[in-house]
Image (cartoon, rainbow, N blue to C red):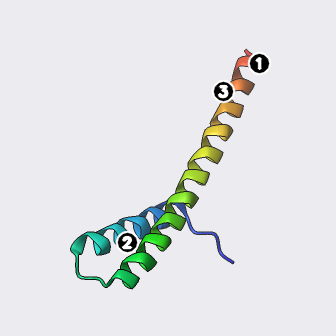
Amino acid sequence: MNKMSFEDNLEILNQMSEKIRSGNLTLEESLKCYKEGMESYKECMKMLEETKLEIEKVIGGDEQDG
């Protein structure tokens, strides 16, 4: 399975949010969009956390070298 980029996940999250806000979906369609949006949200948050840890490693490494 290809891992989507942060930007791709963010775009899906925005699309699902817009669809839900439009008010033109059935309850079932809204729930499907909500679930898909939440999966993208979780992926985005995971990627942000991984990036934060990577930055902290770099900063920590720089402090030890200096």
- The amino acid pointed to by label 1 is Gln
Q: Quarter-wise, where is residue 23 in the image?
A: bottom left
Q: Dot 1 corresponds to which residue?
A: 64
Q: Looking at the rendered structure, which numbered label has been put on residue 24? A: none
Q: Determine the residue located farthest toward the top in the rendered image.
A: 66
Q: Earlier in the sequence, mark 2 or mark 3?
A: 2
Q: Residue at x 40, y 84 (%)?
A: 28
- Looking at marks 1 and 3 on the same chain, the residue that comes earlier in the sequence is marked by 3
Q: Label 2, on which residue?
A: 16
Give the side of residue 19 with respect to residue 41, left or right. Answer: left
Tags 2 and 3 touching, CB below 8 Å: no
Q: Say which residue label 3 marks.
A: 59
Which of the two discs, 2 and 1, labels the residue nearer the N terminus? 2
Answer few, some or many: residues within 10 Å of disc 1's Cα (few below 14, many 20 plus, some between 14 and 19).
Answer: few
Crowdedness of circle 2 by 10 Å Cα count: few (<14), some, many (20+)? Answer: many
Residue at x 74% of width, y 26% of height: 61
Q: Outermost residue, right direction?
A: 64
Q: 42 or 8, which lies in front?
A: 42
Residue 15, quarter of the rendered image: bottom left
How far apart marks 2 and 1 lie (CA) works out to: 44 Å
Q: Quadrant of the C terminus?
A: top right
Q: Is residue 66 left or right of residue 24?
A: right
The structure residue drawn at horizontal position 44% and vertical position 62%, both measured from the top left corner, is: 10
Q: Nearer the viewer, residue 12 or 57?
A: 12
Which of labels 2 and 3 is toward the front? 2
